[in-house]
Amino acid sequence: MTFRKTLILGAALVALGVAAGAASAQTAAQKSMIDAAKAEGTVGEQADGYLGFRQASSDSDLQAAVRVTNEARRRAYASSASQAGTSADVAGARMFETQLLPRISTGQYYKNVQGQWVRR
């Protein structure tokens, strides 16, 4: 197996661990709130692996849910990156490419690497 294939495989396995870690950090109510905000187009996934606000929200509970989720992702990316010998930024971007982007539902938004919000 080439170094590149090994690196890609390792990143994919790390991404799976990151997904599990981030999901366990948020409560069911926070997940539900974020899912609803994604469906409404207020919140979306970003190419850096974090959630972002596509539209400003004054809902402090939603802001807290996004903050909790992003902090859990930040910790998971840092941990995975150290295990894989890469940076947290690379781990987050890889997570977006391999796990988050494929799961974005039709009608939801994501922020691409160019910084543009795109509707799927």
Image (tube, helix red, strand yellow):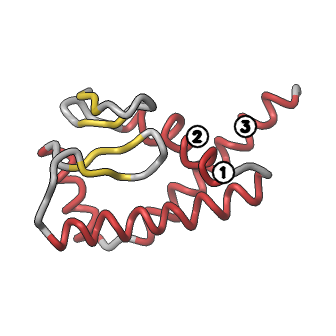
Residue found 25% across the figure and 51% down from its top: 53
Mark 2 or mark 3, which is nearer the start of the sequence? 3
- The amino acid pointed to by label 3 is Leu
Residue corresponding to mark 2: 94
Q: Residues within 10 Å of mark 1 (few under 14, many from 20)?
A: many
Could you say where residue 4 lies in the image, as x and y percent from the top left?
Answer: 80, 28
> How far apart in space, not on screen, are marks 3 and 2 (Cα)?
11 Å
Labels in figure, total = 3
Residue type for callout 1? Val
State the SS at label 1. Answer: helix
Q: Which residue is denoted by mark 1 in the rendering?
A: 14
* Location of residue 57 in the rendering, given as x and y in whole percent from the top left corner: 14, 59
Location of mark 3 (residue): 9
Q: Is residue 26 left or right of residue 76?
A: left
Residue 112 location (% of width, % of height): 39, 31
Q: Residue at x 51, y 55 (%)?
A: 19
Circles 2 and 1 in contact, beta carbons < 8 Å: yes
Whole-percent x and y of residue 83? 77, 58
Task: Say whether residue 110 is left or right of residue 56.
Answer: right
- Which disc number belongs to residue 86? none
Q: In the rendered view, tell whether residue 39 sits above or below residue 109.
A: below
